[in-house]
Image (spheres, rainbow, N blue to C red):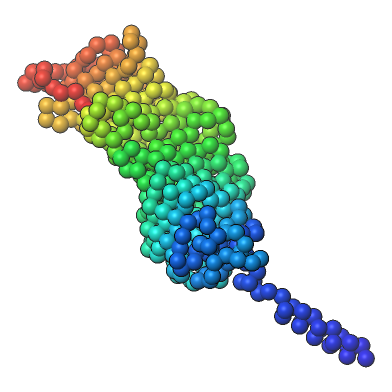
Amino acid sequence: MNMTRTLGFLAALFISLALLPSTAQAVLCGVGGGQCFVVAAGGNSNGAATWSATSGGTTCSGTTCPTGPAATDLICLDSLGGNLTLNALLTVVAFDESGTCTGGSGSPYTGTLNAGSALTLTNGTKFYVSAGSTWTASNQQMTFSPASGVTLPITTNGKALNPMLITGADNTAIVQLQDTLSSGNAAGGYLLIITTGKFDTNNQNVNNYNLQSSNSNTRAVNCGTSTFTWNGAYGGVTILNFSTGGTPTYTCTGATFNFTNTSTTAGSALFFFGTNTGASGLGTMSFNKGGGGGYYIGSGPLAVGTLNLNDATLYLAALSVTATNFASTTSAGHYPLLSTTATGAQATLSVASGTVNCKCILRGINGSGGATFTANPGFDAGQNSNWTFTAPASGGGGGIIGG
């Protein structure tokens, strides 16, 4: 009798479980904690008809997909989805074009994403742009806000993206690159702002993003061995801001920073550093000749492994730059300029040992440290200390100042 009752109970339990929705069926859209797919016809992000609870499914309706994405939903774009336009703020936990969401087609998205409005990943877990899709960038900001202890991976597959804001919960909330990150505005760069949390390049390269970390919060930047490249018209634009404020942690001694200001005006690209940057230091910084604009470091101190002045103009406020190595290059009839902007004051270039030979025009620069400082060939424009100058062999009085 007991065995009969047991078998009956198990049979009833099996039937009850069989009637429950499957995992795929339970994934909803618009009610939170679910998945939202774009229908084949595509559409605007704020339109319920653009979204479906299933890959290749019909437009939102009923209890499984009432309104389109909710703030705690996951955006799933796969090979069955049409073109999507972000025409209003879209707040979700993840954005995934890989096609691997639960119940997805299994193949990545190949449509066009027009990022005309802001995108926010609150408690974000993933951002993935597929290699076969088209990303049309705008100046609308994307915000990445992972929770404590969460690493939010960023994969772009070569797509140039919108401006980015990182607001992680704390320094254990990490936004981490999985491949090269490029700005959608190569001419002047878009801002990459680290307000809170940690930005980890994961040794991936960064192109044309103007990096800003200057607020009063706790934050971290891990540059690894990445190469940061700025190549555009940066007259009057702040490229790199690691100034004081809050409790930042910068781990950038292994990174390379290349700057080429192609601006045809006299405006300089701007840089700001502080005691926190000086304590940790940067790797290699190369200021390259571009257009008519130069470069200006407005605050410091700054510690750098190797400082390269490649036929360019570099202005310094009354601050100190400490370099392990310093090098300069010239072109025919053209000399770089290293100058302070402070009237009656000097900037300091400190190198501990060896010989520093700046083939350049110098003004208001104090050579400091144990190195020997020479300008051969070079020009003394006044207010310099501890330099030995040797004029060009053929006179060279008509040398052109670097730009």
In the image, farthest residue toward the top: 344
Viewer-proximal residue among 275 and 354: 275
Looking at the image, which residue is at 64% across and 67% down?
A: 62
Image position, residue 68 (x, y; %): 57, 59
Q: Can residue 304 be seen in this view?
A: no
Q: In which quarter of the image is the N terminus?
A: bottom right
Q: Please tell me whether residue 43 is drawn above or below residue 290 in the rendered image.
A: below
Q: Quadrant of the C terminus?
A: top left
Name which quarter of the figure residue 389 lies in.
top left
Looking at the image, which residue is at 48% across and 34% down?
A: 213
In the image, farthest residue toward the left: 394
Name which quarter of the figure residue 313 lies in.
top left
Q: Please tell me whether residue 42 is drawn above or below residue 211 in the rendered image.
A: below
Name which quarter of the figure residue 79 lies in.
bottom left
In the image, farthest residue toward the right: 1
Describe residue 367's horizontal placement relative to residue 275 as left or right. left
Looking at the image, which residue is at 38% across and 31% down?
A: 238
Q: Is residue 57 visible?
A: yes
Viewer-proximal residue among 391 and 11: 11
Viewer-proximal residue among 249 and 126: 126
Q: Please tell me whether residue 47 is drawn above or below residue 295 in the rendered image.
A: below
